[in-house]
Image (cartoon, rainbow, N blue to C red):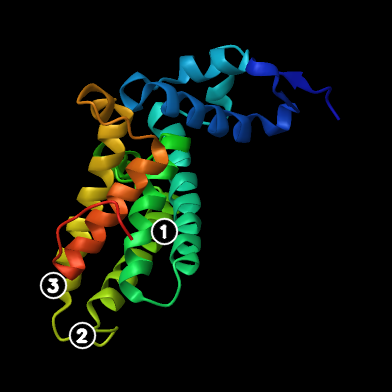
């Protein structure tokens, strides 16, 4: 077996594990700089490998990003499922909790819906990404249906789709505003947990029709 190689930030990995290391380093770069600054060369430098090395595993930037997006969708679905479970039996609270979980996930991993459903990745028709993205949205749509009290046999599927659209917009908006530092600039020094609470409250209000606040 080849000797392990040391990458950036003291990582150690075997040559056969470079693909996984590239994906993980990509998350670090996204969390720090966002999708606009993402490049294969930046990821390679972060790992301390040649700029040619990543191309043994990914033909271009978009294919690397697709692998990251698929991983992000899988991880996010797990976080949302756990958040719903932890929220207890109330369907509204289960649904609302996923907004806070989304904010925390984006804060930690840097990859949200803008990465998972990036338009530039659509032409790739990546099967892993398509399946992971579909499973993620199916999970959220099911929770939206339950929150509305209509169940899977609803005669008005558009209501659940509309709620999900608003829910996703609010959650992603809070995550984006937090990462951009807006809350601190306007005097609201919300940490990631405070922002997650705000997103949860906004989602709760979408269903219950009450003014959004950070209360329970």
Q: Quadrant of the N terminus?
A: top right
Q: Is residue 2 above or below residue 169?
A: above
Q: Nearer the viewer, residue 130 or 148?
A: 148
Calculate the distance from the C-alpha at mark 2 to the C-alpha at mark 3. 9 Å
Q: Quadrant of the C terminus?
A: bottom left
To which residue does mark 3 refer? Answer: 158
To which residue does mark 1 refer? Answer: 131
Q: Is residue 109 left or right of residue 140?
A: right
Q: What residue do we see at 34% from left, 49% from top?
A: 197
Dot 1 lies on which element? Answer: helix
Residue 100 position in % (x across, y down):
37, 51
Label 3 Cα neighbours within 10 Å, binned few <14 / some 14-19 / many ≥20: few
Which one is in front in this view, the residue at disc 2 or the one at disc 1?
Answer: 2
Q: Is residue 8 visible?
A: yes
Q: What residue do we see at 62% from left, 30% from top?
A: 21
Quarter-of-image position of residue 8? top right
Q: Nearer the viewer, residue 15 or 208?
A: 208
Q: Is residue 1 above or below residue 94?
A: above
| Residue 154: image tag | 2
Residue 174 position in % (x across, y down):
26, 41
Quarter-of-image position of residue 45? top right
Q: Nearer the viewer, residue 69 or 182?
A: 182
Dot 3 lies on which element? Answer: helix
Calculate the distance from the C-alpha at mark 2 to the C-alpha at mark 1. 24 Å
Calculate the distance from the C-alpha at mark 1 to the C-alpha at mark 3. 22 Å
Q: What residue do we see at 34% from left, 27% from top?
A: 35
Q: What residue do we see at 61% from left, 36% from top?
A: 20
**Sequence order check, earlier mark of 2 and 1:** 1
Residue 149 position in % (x across, y down):
25, 82
Asked if the residue under mark 3 is in contact with the one under mark 2, i.e. CB atoms within 8 Å, the reply is no
Q: Is residue 128 left or right of residue 97?
A: right
Quarter-of-image position of residue 77? bottom left
């Amino acid at each position: 077996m080849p000797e392990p190689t040391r990458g950036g930030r003291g990582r150690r990995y075997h040559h056969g594990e470079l693909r996984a290391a590239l994906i993980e380093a990509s998350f670090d770069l996204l969390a720090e700089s966002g999708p606009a600054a993402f490049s294969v060369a930046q990821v390679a430098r972060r790992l301390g490998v040649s700029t040619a090395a990543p191309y043994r595993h990914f033909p271009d930037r978009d294919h690397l990003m697709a692998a990251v997006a698929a991983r992000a969708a899988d991880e996010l679905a797990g976080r949302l499922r756990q958040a719903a479970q932890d929220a207890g039996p109330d369907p509204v609270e289960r649904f609302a909790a996923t907004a806070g979980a989304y904010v925390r996930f984006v804060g930690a991993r840097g990859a949200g819906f803008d990465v998972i459903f990036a338009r530039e990745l659509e032409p790739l028709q990546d099967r892993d990404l398509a399946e992971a993205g579909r499973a993620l949205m199916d999970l959220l749509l099911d929770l939206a249906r339950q929150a509305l009290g209509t169940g899977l046999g609803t005669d008005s599927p558009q209501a659940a789709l509309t709620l999900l659209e608003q829910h996703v917009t609010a959650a992603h908006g809070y995550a984006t505003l937090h990462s951009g530092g807006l809350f601190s600039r306007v005097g609201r020094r919300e940490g990631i947990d405070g922002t997650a609470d705000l997103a949860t409250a906004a989602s709760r209000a979408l269903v219950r029709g009450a003014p959004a606040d950070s209360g329970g």
